[in-house]
Image (cartoon, rainbow, N blue to C red):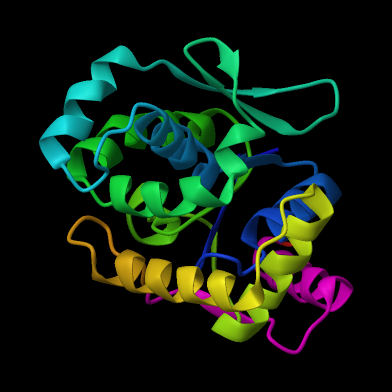
């Protein structure tokens, strides 16, 4: 079977990770959450108390880091930072804005680019992030730009945080999402944008099952999977 790459881009909280993971499982593809890779670096910068906007300070940390992507017995992607599993820590709310700032630095994006491309060279993948279809995998067989309104994304994020036992008020979460949207679309390095050949999938008025069905339909129509 030929190797197929699926690129899913979109703003924070659009459901990229959940939908891409489920679709990959249905199709027998490897799921790659690139946001988690960037979050791992964002977490290190947060933990060390470094200003994430200071490009020179962030770049100076990169040689000290060993970022690895593994899959546990649970079948889920795990992130290792210098040999330590930080999968849970990188999802803390305070890490999100650090990640958004850190991921805007060209040195960080260059540091992680080859790691992402190597995964797609060796196996069929569904990879999600913010510049997968535009920069990381510009020749992907299928490109999807997955989005939803900021309000819908904030409500989903609040439910997710409640389930994790780290609740946050809706107003605060919405403000953080809007700030991250601005950061992601205005950064100089690989800003978030829809690739010209990407299919737009807006899930504002869809539940999970409807969103997954729509995503799988797009993929299957273009790859005959």
- Provide residue 174's location: percent of width, then percent of height: 55, 76
The quarter of the displayed image where residue 51 is located: top left
Q: Is residue 196 visible?
A: yes
- The answer to whether 77 is drawn above or below residue 68 in the figure is below
In this rendering, the count of numbered labels is: 0
The residue furthest left is 56
Q: Which residue is pictured at 19% across the width and 44% down the height? A: 106
- Residues rendered magenta in the picture: 195-223
Indicate whether residue 200 is drawn in magenta: yes
The quarter of the displayed image where residue 69 is located: top right
Frontmost residue, 18 versus 59: 59
Q: Which residue is pictured at 29% across the width and 41% down the height? A: 109
The residue furthest top is 83
**Left of 76 or right of it: where is 176?**
left
**Left of 102 or right of it: where is 225?**
right
Frontmost residue, 178 versus 113: 178
Q: Which residue is pictured at 37% across the width and 54% down the height? A: 100
- Provide residue 177's location: percent of width, then percent of height: 49, 70
Frontmost residue, 19 versus 150: 150
**Left of 48 or right of it: where is 212?**
right
> Which quadrant: the N terminus?
top right
Q: Is residue 225 visible?
A: no
Indicate whether residue 216 is drawn in magenta: yes
Q: Which residue is pictured at 76% across the width and 33% down the height? A: 76
- The answer to whether 18 is drawn above or below residue 211 in the figure is above
**Left of 109 or right of it: where is 161?**
right
- Provide residue 4's location: percent of width, then percent of height: 60, 46
> Which quadrant: the C terminus?
bottom right
């Amino acid at each position: 079977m030929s190797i197929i790459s699926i690129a899913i881009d979109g703003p924070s909280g659009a459901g990229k990770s959940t939908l891409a993971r489920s679709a990959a499982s249905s199709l027998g593809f490897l799921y790659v959450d690139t946001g988690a890779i960037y979050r791992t670096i964002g977490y290190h910068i947060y933990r060390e108390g470094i200003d994430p906007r200071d490009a020179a300070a962030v770049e100076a940390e990169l040689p000290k880091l060993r970022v690895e992507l593994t899959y546990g017995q649970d079948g889920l992607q795990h992130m290792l930072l210098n040999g330590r599993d930080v999968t849970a820590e990188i999802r803390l709310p305070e890490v999100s804005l650090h990640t958004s700032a850190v991921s805007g630095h060209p040195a960080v994006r260059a540091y992680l680019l080859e790691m992402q491309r190597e995964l797609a060279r060796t196996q069929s993948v569904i990879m999600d992030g913010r510049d997968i279809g535009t920069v990381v995998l510009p020749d992907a067989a299928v490109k999807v730009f997955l989005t939803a309104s900021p309000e819908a994304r904030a409500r989903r994020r609040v439910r997710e945080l409640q389930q994790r036992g780290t609740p946050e008020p809706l107003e605060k979460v919405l403000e953080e999402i809007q700030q991250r949207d601005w950061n992601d679309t205005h950064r100089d390095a690989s800003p978030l944008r829809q690739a010209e050949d990407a299919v737009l999938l807006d899930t504002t008025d869809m539940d999970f099952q409807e969103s997954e069905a729509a995503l799988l339909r797009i993929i299957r129509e273009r790859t005959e999977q």
